[in-house]
Amino acid sequence: MSDVIAPPSVRALALQKGIDLEKLARELGRTTIAREDLESGKPAAGPVGDTTYWDVDHAQYGPVTEDPMSRFARVAAGNLAAANALIPQVTHHDRADVTAIETLRKELKPEAQARGVKLTALAFQAKALARALREFPRFNASLSPDGKALILKDYVHIGIAVDTAHGLMVPVLRNVDRKGLWQIADEITDLADRAQARKIGPDEMGGASMSISNLGGIGGLGFTPIVNPPEVAILGITRTETVTLWEGDTPRPVPMVPLDLSYDHRVINGADAARFMTYLAGLIADPRRIMV
């Protein structure tokens, strides 16, 4: 059994780069390996790590400039590549009626201003996701590195993906199931602001039950977010659109938010994903159920 101590994300990145962790540990003279130790590793041969086929002299076709990727972006790229290569991922698409949420947000606007809190739809969606994770514990879990056990978590922490000038960051909102909407909204704003200012500490970036990637403020009809291991699922949200629903022969315009759930098929099957999304969409459509 290996004596090397390394988290699953580091082991996945090492596999993607073709780095022998035990050999690297011997060379470094220690047993604990972090992401930073893999930066000088040589890429693996084969479809996962072999990039020689895109080693092209682009300048022969016209003028080019080179914009070096930051260390932060290189590490993130390695993690995403490893996750996408190693996880059998499926994405389930659905949508939820946000009429009640938008009505409630308008009613609470004066109180939000008095509190100095920006009450976004994301606060409701995060609270709904927390309730769904309690209802479906298999989604609030991680697969052991050897794939032989499922680690079920008795806490609900949600990662909030933040698009920053220095790359994507995913700070984690802790114990969302035990917090009210005002606190959740305030903490989401705080995490996003500090992520933009690069003031998020390492202890605020790990341990999420599931992450949310929200593109609603930018646009899009839907997308396929990549599962962020050791999580087993990720929720994507895009821009709310008005959809015509029919009640008999009567058309009714309804604001609907697209939801995209990517999940690790080793842990979650399609029927469970559909049930999870149906439950989540129901909570979003009736926010009274998440405020109890």
Image: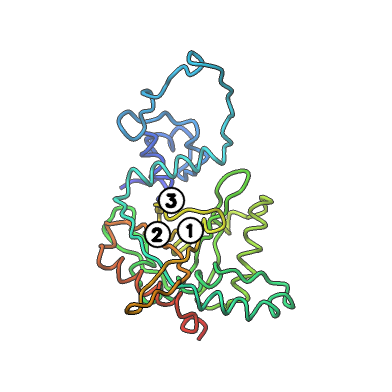
**Amino acid beneath label 3:** Pro
Verify CB contact (< 8 Å) between mark 3 and mark 1: no
**In the image, which disc is placed on residue 7?**
3
* Mark closer to the chain start, 2 or 1: 1
Q: Can you give x and y, in whole percent of width and height, for residue 254 in the image? A: 45, 72
Colour scheme of the rendered structure: rainbow
Labelled disc at residue 260: 2
Cα separation, mark 3 vs mark 1, equals 31 Å
Q: CA distance from mark 2 to mark 1?
A: 8 Å
SS at mark 2? strand
Identified by mark 1, the residue type is Thr
Residue type, label 2: Asp
Q: Which residue is mark 1?
A: 238
Of marks 2 and 3, which one's residue comes earlier in the chain? 3
Give the x, y percent position of residue 168.
55, 48
- In the displayed orientation, state which residue is furthest to the bottom: 292
- Determine whether 41 is above or below 103 in the image: above
Where 148 sits versus 288, above or below?
Answer: above
Lower position in the chain sequence, tag 3 or tag 1: 3
Whether tag 2 and tag 1 are in contact, CB under 8 A, the answer is: yes
Front-lying residue, 35 or 283: 283
Residue 218 position in % (x across, y down): 55, 53
User: Is 3 displayed left or right of 107 in the figure?
Assistant: left
SS of the residue under disc 3: loop
The location of residue 256, given as percent across then percent down, is 45, 68
Q: Quadrant of residue 266?
A: bottom left
